[in-house]
Image: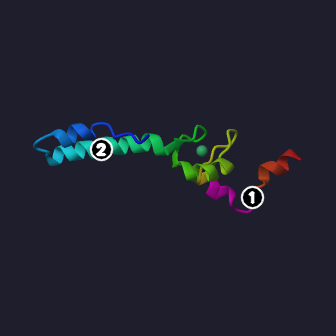
Amino acid sequence: MPKTPPGLMKLLKKKNITRKDIDKYNCRAFDTYNETALVKCHFCNRSFLEERMKGHFKICKKEKPFNKLEERKVSGSNHNIYENAMD
Ligand SMILES: [Zn+2]
């Protein structure tokens, strides 16, 4: 069942809705959206949209959290250096 966003009815009942009231409401609605639509990755502590999270999980592992800088470094020719050392 669809739920009315918190504070919306209260805002609409107000006689003089000011720009500030709307901003305040929008801000709260945005926070709610962020909390519900974004999923936080516990490995790298970044937040993603749920649909993007699926792809992220493939490259972000507990032992080796995804790191943009590191990703750039390992994409070079030496990316197997650690794996080779284990042999
Ligand atoms: Zn991650």
Q: Which element type, helix, strand or loop, lies under badge 2? A: helix
Q: Residue at x 14, y 45 (%)?
A: 17
x then y, percent, for residue 87: 89, 47
**Which residue corresponds to the image point at 10% horizontal and 44% vertical from the top-left?**
16
Dot 1, crowdedness within 10 Å: few (<14), some or many (≥20)?
few
Please identify, in this view, whether the residue under mark 2 or under mark 1 is nearer the observer. Answer: 2
Is 69 a magenta residue?
Answer: no
In the image shown, does 2 or 32 lie closer to the viewer?
A: 2
**Ligand 1 shown in quarter:** top right
Residue lying at the far right in this picture: please name it: 87
- Which image quarter: residue 8? top left
Residue closest to the eye, 43 or 50: 50
Magenta region, residue range: 71-78
**Left or right: 18 with respect to 7?**
left
Residue 72 located within the stretch drawn in magenta: yes
The residue wearing badge 1 is: 78
Q: Position of residue 35 (x, y in %)?
A: 44, 40
Q: Is residue 32 left or right of residue 70?
A: left
| Residue in the picture at 47% in, 45% down | 37
Question: Residue 74, how many percent across, how many down?
Answer: 69, 56
The residue at which mark 2 appears reads as 27
Residue at the image position 27 percent from the left and 37 percent from the top: 7
Considering depth in this image, is 77 or 36 the residue closer to the camera? 36
Marks counted in the figure total: 2
Residue 21 percent location from the top left of the image: 19, 43
Left or right: residue 16 versus residue 39 is: left
